[in-house]
Image (cartoon, rainbow, N blue to C red):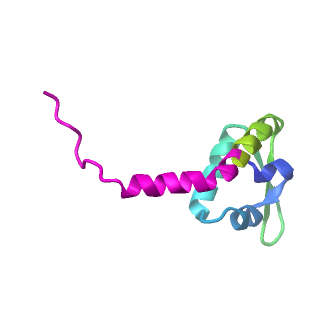
Amino acid sequence: MGLLGTGPKRYSELHRAIDGISQRMLTLTLRSLERDGLVERTVTPTSPPRVDYSLTPIGQTLSTQVSTLIQWAEDHREYIATSRLHYDLTDRPTTAPSES
């Protein structure tokens, strides 16, 4: 949604811009956002067909909040990565404690 906040994008533009996302996951996410009424899919009958995605008016109302969340995540990326590494390296019990 953050990428669509600046205007319509082709599927291929979205796929290139989102590092590490599979085509399947991007397709499922876009379908879900379309189902929720936040994203609109437009097919132009060319060869091959051109598919564009854009925010709906209600999706645009969410765009500011999503942009704020994205900015927060970018500002705290290093902290989160360090926290994950620390968590992963800490010994943790492999089973839940038994109830007495």
The residue that appears at 60% across and 65% down in the rendered structure is 20
Q: Which residues are magenta?
A: 72-100
Residue at screen point 52% across, 56% down: 82
Q: Quadrant of residue 14?
A: bottom right
Q: Choose between 100 and 57: the one closer to the eye.
A: 100
Q: Nearer the viewer, residue 72 or 51?
A: 72
* Residue at left offset 13%, top offset 27%: 100
At a point 73% along the width and 47% down the height, the residue shown is 71
Report whether 83 appears left or right of 28: left
Residue 80 location, x and y as percent? 56, 51
- Residue 54 at x, y = what percent? 81, 49
Where on the picture, by quarter, is residue 23?
bottom right
Q: Position of residue 93 (x, y in %)?
A: 25, 47
Please name whichever residue, 83 or 68, is drawn nearer the observer in this view of the structure.
Answer: 83
Query: Residue extending furthest left?
Result: 100
| Residue 89: percent from left, percent from top | 37, 58
Residue 80 belongs to the span the image colors magenta: yes
Residue 8 is inside the magenta segment: no
